[in-house]
Amino acid sequence: MGVDKLRGNIYTALMKALRKLEDKRDALLEELGEVGPFMEGSVGRNGWHCRNPRCRCQRGELHRATILTWKEKQRTVSRHVPKALEAEVRQWTAEMRRVRSLIKQIAAVQREIFYRLRER
């Protein structure tokens, strides 16, 4: 096999690998386009004691609330989440995690494409 033939085979293999990476990137970009509403933060449960000496919380049964926590200007901010919104807020924060994951995956594939294009 001649050198030109070998170069041609290597180039063809490189182009196939590149096309496969581009297809993967395009699929991830398409999935990113299907993302629903999203919001930064994490949802958690909080418990506390009130100051009423006759309250049940003084016997160990804490008051409970759902809170949304996020960072704003390098400070932690927390807000109460009404029960009626809890499921929806949890979905929004889950979508944000999905967005971050997709962006990381797209960036990794794009970086690999960059490396392959540099080798040509």
Image: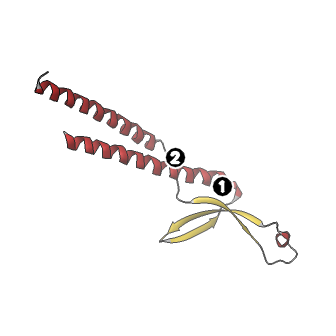
Between marks 1 and 2, how big is the CA–CA gap? 16 Å
Residue 76 x, y percent position in the rendering: 55, 70
The amino acid type found where label 2 is placed reads Gly
29 left or right, relative to 114: right
**Which colour style is shown?**
secondary structure
Question: What residue is disc 1 on?
Answer: 85
Q: Is there any visible trace of residue 117 in the rendered image? A: yes
Q: Is residue 113 above or below residue 16?
A: below
Q: Is residue 24 above or below residue 47?
A: above
**First in sequence: mark 1 or mark 2?**
2
Residue that appears at 38% across and 45% down? 106
63 left or right, relative to 87: right
Closer to the camera, 81 or 118?
118
Which label belongs to residue 58? none
Q: Dot 1: few (<14), some (14–19), or many (≥20) neighbours within 10 Å?
A: few
Residue at the front extreme of this rendering: 1
Residue that appears at 24% across and 33% down? 14
27 left or right, relative to 36: left
Q: Is residue 98 above or below residue 82?
A: above
The amino acid type found where label 1 is placed reads Leu
Closer to the camera, 42 or 5?
5
Question: What residue is disc 2 on?
Answer: 36
Would you say the residues marked 1 and 2 are in contact, meaning their CB atoms lie under 8 Å apart?
no
Q: Dot 2: few (<14), some (14–19), or many (≥20) neighbours within 10 Å?
A: few
Residue that appears at 38% across and 36% down? 24
Residue 44 x, y percent position in the rendering: 65, 60
Dot 2: what SS?
loop
Residue at the right extreme of this rendering: 54
Quadrant containing the N terminus in the rendered view: top left
Dot 1: what SS?
helix
57 left or right, relative to 46: right
